Image (cartoon, grey):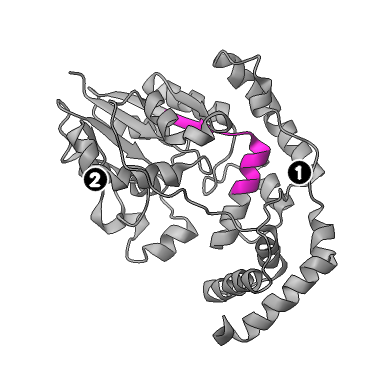
């Protein structure tokens, strides 16, 4: 039996946490069925079991990682040592090894190939989604966690033109080419096609043995437009201040009985910028995958559904902001 490794690469905001939590909840069952999902005890709280390896390859932690694991000095991490620990208890003749981390970047592909056993067949699996929907969700998450505090326009400009690997750049062709070059193949799943059967689609693409696994509750990470607007509208000087502001926003939403609303915060200009940056590579990727006729899968919408500036200046948000400000000034009332 050829040793086999599956790499679940994310991307971020394509249901990665749900997949990872379901895998973690079924570790014993998986191993009984020939799939090993290792965990490193010092970072067991992370959903992805290989995020420490990805962080070691990057050489710099995200703000969220640094806050969650202050005792880990990433500058001292040896990626090879982390990889050895992940595969130490793997039985390659009897089971597949499954590693999951949505913070792996294209440049990590050849580095990771060198760290994994040369005799193993490695199957990368990447989930992708249309860049406008993806960027909107990614921006929401990073704002909610306090990893960024900037306008959506600045964030889009960063993703379109930067090589800053702290954030995932959604040129999916670049990702696929890098993983194919390193490992010979990369399975691609379109999130919008499978979001109602996400785990099953991942499992099928990974070509793992049939396995009846207990489900877990879906993960809801986004915040509604009122809370997002409140975080964008106020500058904080420490993470503690940011957390107080986020708590006040959540409490105000509950107090006012607001129906949660999710709107895209991407304006027309940001959408046009995304289309200019990624439309050509999207077309090339679809052609490469034999999906050229399905251009709608990655056809970036240039029409905005919300004028964020007008919303933040409107009466409804002003009422919300006053309520949140009052709760921020009296935290005992939260």
Camera-nearest label, 2 or 1: 1
* Quadrant of the rendered image containing residue 334: bottom right
Q: Is residue 107 visible?
A: no
- Which portion, as a residue range, is magenta? 125-137
* Quadrant of the rendered image containing residue 41: bottom left
Q: Please tell me which residue lies in front, 102 or 62.
A: 102
Q: Is residue 247 visible?
A: yes
Please say if the residues under marks 2 and 1 sit with CB atoms less than 8 Å apart: no
**Residue tagged by mark 2?**
81
107 to the left or right of 23: right
Q: Secondary structure at mark 2?
A: helix
Vertical position of residue 116 compared to residue 313: above or below? above
224 to the left or right of 109: right
Point 71% across, 50% down: residue: 263
Percent from the top left, x then y, of residue 171? 59, 32
Q: Secondary structure at mark 1?
A: helix
């Amino acid at each position: 039996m050829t040793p086999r490794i599956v790499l679940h690469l994310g991307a971020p905001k394509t249901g990665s946490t749900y997949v990872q939590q379901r895998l973690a909840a079924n570790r014993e069952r998986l191993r009984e069925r020939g799939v090993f999902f290792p965990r490193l005890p010092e970072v067991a709280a992370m959903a992805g079991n290989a995020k420490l390896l990805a962080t070691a390859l990057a050489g710099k932690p995200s703000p969220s990682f640094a806050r969650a694991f202050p005792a880990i000095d990433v500058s001292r991490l040896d990626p090879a040592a982390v990889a050895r620990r992940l595969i130490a208890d793997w039985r390659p003749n009897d089971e597949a090894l499954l590693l999951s981390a949505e913070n792996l970047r294209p440049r990590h592909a050849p580095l990771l190939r060198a760290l994994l056993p040369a005799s193993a067949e490695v199957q990368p699996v990447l989930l992708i989604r249309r860049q406008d929907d993806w960027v909107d969700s990614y921006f929401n998450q990073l704002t909610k966690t306090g990893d960024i505090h900037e306008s959506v326009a600045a964030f889009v400009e960063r993703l379109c033109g930067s090589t800053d690997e702290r954030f995932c750049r959604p040129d999916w062709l670049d990702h696929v080419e890098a993983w194919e070059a390193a490992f010979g193949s990369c399975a691609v799943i379109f999130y919008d096609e499978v979001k109602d059967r996400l785990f099953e689609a991942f499992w099928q693409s990974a070509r793992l043995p049939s396995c009846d696994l207990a489900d877990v509750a879906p993960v809801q990470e986004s915040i509604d437009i009122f809370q997002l607007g409140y975080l964008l509208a106020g500058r904080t000087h420490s993470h503690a201040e940011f957390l107080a502001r986020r708590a006040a926003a959540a409490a105000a939403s509950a107090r006012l009985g607001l129906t949660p609303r999710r709107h895209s915060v991407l304006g027309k200009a940001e959408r046009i910028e995304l289309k200019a940056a990624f439309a050509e590579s999207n077309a090339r990727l679809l052609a490469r995958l034999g999906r050229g006729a399905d251009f709608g899968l990655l056809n970036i919408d240039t029409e905005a559904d919300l004028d964020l500036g007008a919303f933040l200046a409107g009466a409804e948000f002003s009422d919300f902001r006053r309520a949140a400000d009052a709760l921020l000034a009296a935290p005992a009332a939260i």
